[in-house]
Image (spheres, rainbow, N blue to C red):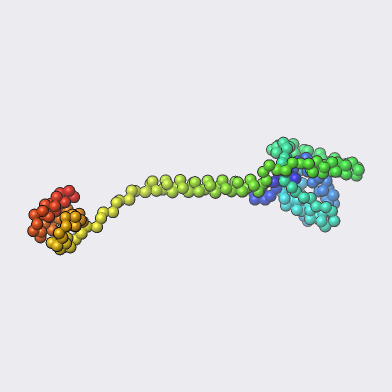
């Protein structure tokens, strides 16, 4: 029955014309029994008949509450595929149609009213099932929102990362001159000597120079200092 939707986080329904006939008849049956203190009656008539809005599930609940109190069958709402009428945004047309049905049912004889409502119920029984239920649509919508939020956060992260100043590459720790002198005095393999010198800064290489007796190592220290000035 109808197409379900939400208005301000409240479930509501767009009805077909046959469904409206059944709803209006159900309302007329309990109208004399609605308490004067129940403000929902005025709100329902204002929304449904005057403004041609969809019907909130809360109004269905209120009508059913009175019907249960009087031992009458309650109204059950089911989702179906809908026609152009239920889909149409023309609220003035719906308002006029509902007012006409309300007036016709009030004036109809009992037999005529029963026949019309029976025919409307039969039409309701053959309404096709929904291609896409409200819950399925809502789940898909939430999935899209989640994906869009994730994409937005990723784009934001990239923009913020691009705006940051580039991180300076940390300079390798240099070897203190005192330690380098001791190592070079005892090192014998060329690759070890090269590793020690590579750890020296340009200034420390010159500082180490006077303490080294090997001319080959001195040349390497001078070359290293020149390359790193």
Q: Residue at x 11, y 52 (%)?
A: 219
Label total for image:
0
Name above or below for residue 95 compared with residue 186: above
Name above or below for residue 106 compared with residue 176: above
Quadrant of the rendered image containing residue 109: top right
Q: Residue 104: x, y in percent?
A: 85, 40
Q: Residue 157: x, y in percent?
A: 44, 49
Q: Residue 67: x, y in percent?
A: 82, 54
Q: Is residue 29 visible?
A: yes
In the image, 178: left or right of 139? Answer: left
In the image, 171: left or right of 62? Answer: left
- Quadrant assignment for the N terminus: top right
Relative depth, front residue between 14 and 181: 181
Q: Is residue 7 visible?
A: no
Relative depth, front residue between 190 and 49: 190
Name, please, the residue furthest toward the front. Answer: 189
Q: Residue at x 68, y 42 (%)?
A: 131
Quadrant of the rendered image containing residue 172: bottom left
Quadrant of the rendered image containing residue 208: bottom left
Q: Residue at x 76, y 50 (%)?
A: 60
In the image, 74: left or right of 140? Answer: right
Relative depth, front residue between 210 and 113: 210
Name above or below for residue 180 compared with residue 137: below
Q: Residue 79: x, y in percent?
A: 72, 46
């Amino acid at each position: 029955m109808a197409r379900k939707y939400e208005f301000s986080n409240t479930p509501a329904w767009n009805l077909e014309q046959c469904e409206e006939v059944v709803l209006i008849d159900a309302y007329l049956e309990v109208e004399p029994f609605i308490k004067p203190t129940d403000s929902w009656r005025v709100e329902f008539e204002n929304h449904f008949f005057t403004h041609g809005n969809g019907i909130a599930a809360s109004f269905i609940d209120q009508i059913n509450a009175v019907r249960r109190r009087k031992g009458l069958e309650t109204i059950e709402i089911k989702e179906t595929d809908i026609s152009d009428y239920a889909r149409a945004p023309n609220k003035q047309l719906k308002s006029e149609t509902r007012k006409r049905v309300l007036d016709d049912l009030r004036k109809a004889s009992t037999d005529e009213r029963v026949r019309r409502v029976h025919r409307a119920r039969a039409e309701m029984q053959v309404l096709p099932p929904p291609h896409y239920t409200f819950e399925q649509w809502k789940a898909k919508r939430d999935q899209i929102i989640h994906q869009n939020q994730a994409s937005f956060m990723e784009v934001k992260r990239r923009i913020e990362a691009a705006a940051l100043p580039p991180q300076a590459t940390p300079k390798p720790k240099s070897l203190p001159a005192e330690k380098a002198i001791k190592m070079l005095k005892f090192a014998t393999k060329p690759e070890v000597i090269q590793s020690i010198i590579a750890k020296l800064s340009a200034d420390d290489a010159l500082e180490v120079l006077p303490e080294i007796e090997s001319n080959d190592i001195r040349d390497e220290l001078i070359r290293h200092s020149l390359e790193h000035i």
